[in-house]
Each structure stands twice: as C-alpha cells, then as structure tokens.
C-alpha cells in the first residue's frame, strides 16, 4: 500500500546493481572473488554468488503480489502503481492515517502516554479515534482544531 517493494526484492535489486558494477570493472580485485570464486572450505548458507541471477524487481513484485493469499487482495491489483490519495498533502494524509490506524492524539492515547490527566471525552466516554469518528460533533471539533497539522 505504501508503494515500496518488499525488503527481499530491494535486496536482490541492490545485489544486481552491485554485481553489474563489479562485472563492468574486471580489474577490481573483488571481480575474481565474485565471478571466479574458488570452492569454499566451509559451505556458506547464502553464498554471495548464488545471487548472480538477474531479477527484475517489478515483475517479481507483481508475481509475488498475485500469488499472495491476503484477504483484501483484490483492492490493489497492481502493487507498482500508486493508489488514489497517494499524492495528498501531508496534513490530510496524516489525519486520515491517524483515523485509519486508530493511533492519533486523542485523549485516550495522550492519557496512555502520560500527557493528560484523563482519557475521557466531554461526553464522559473514553475519547478514542473511533469515538471521535462515531460522534459527529466531536469529529467536527477535532478536525477544526488548527493545531493538528
């Protein structure tokens, strides 16, 4: 959802870039170590030369995404394209993300962090992000507050 490839694909892409750089400089001492390596005395679990096969990160990412067994798999068809709302300004994006995760500067969180004396809303219930959304007048007051951004 963040349009960032998985770490294993980023690592393979970085290894491809490094190997192509080493391969283009055959006079470097490391070239012989990587491409003409002697048989190891001890067998490594993941020898560096086992990553020599080139991997197209975007193609592999799409294949991994299609084969994943995630409940909401159909929401994002292509992981490489940016999703709608990705280009929102920071303030609304941050606000939406607070409500999506339920982790924002509401009184319940501030109380948990030791920054306020009470976790209760003006109506008497604990003020969570979900409570702010469910109570329309509270949501209006919370979003109108200019110190949130």
Image (spheres, grey):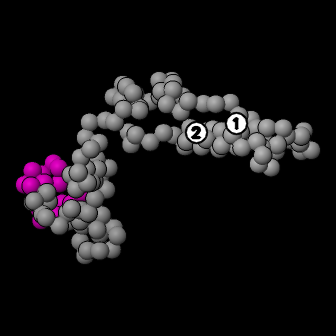
Q: Position of residue 8 (x, y in %)?
A: 58, 40
Asked whether residue 46 is in view, the answer is: no
64 left or right of 83 in image: right
Residue in the image at 71% along x and 34% along y: 52
Looking at the image, is 95 positioned above or below residue 43? below
Point out which mark residue 51 bears: 1
Q: Dot 2: within a 10 Å radius of its alpha carbon, few (fewer than 14), some, or many (20 or more) residues?
A: some
- Would you identify the image quadrant in which residue 7 lies? top right
Rendered-image quadrant of the N terminus: top left
Rendered-image quadrant of the C terminus: bottom left
Q: Nearer the viewer, residue 73 or 5?
A: 5
Q: Which residue is mark 2?
A: 13
Contact, mark 1 vs mark 2 (Cβ under 8 Å): no
Q: Position of residue 87 (x, y in %)?
A: 27, 44
Q: Residue furthest left?
A: 137
Q: Position of residue 136 (x, y in %)?
A: 9, 50
Let me know if residue 65 is in the magenta part: no
25 left or right of 118 in image: right
Looking at the image, is 36 positioned above or below residue 107? above
In the image, the segment drawn in magenta is 121-140
């Amino acid at each position: 959802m963040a349009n960032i490839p998985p770490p294993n694909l980023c690592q393979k892409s970085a290894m491809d870039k490094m190997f192509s750089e080493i391969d283009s400089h055959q006079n470097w001492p490391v070239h012989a170590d990587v491409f003409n390596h002697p048989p190891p005395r001890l067998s490594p679990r993941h020898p560096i030369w086992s990553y020599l096969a080139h991997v197209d990160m975007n193609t592999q990412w799409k294949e991994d995404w299609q084969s994943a067994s995630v409940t909401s798999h159909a929401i994002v068809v292509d992981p490489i394209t940016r999703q709608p709302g990705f280009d929102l300004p920071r303030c609304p994006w941050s606000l939406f993300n607070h409500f999506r995760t339920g982790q924002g500067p509401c009184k319940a969180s501030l109380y948990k962090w030791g920054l306020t004396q009470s976790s209760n809303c003006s109506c008497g219930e604990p003020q969570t992000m979900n409570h702010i959304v469910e109570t329309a007048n509270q949501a209006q007051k919370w979003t109108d507050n200019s110190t949130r951004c």
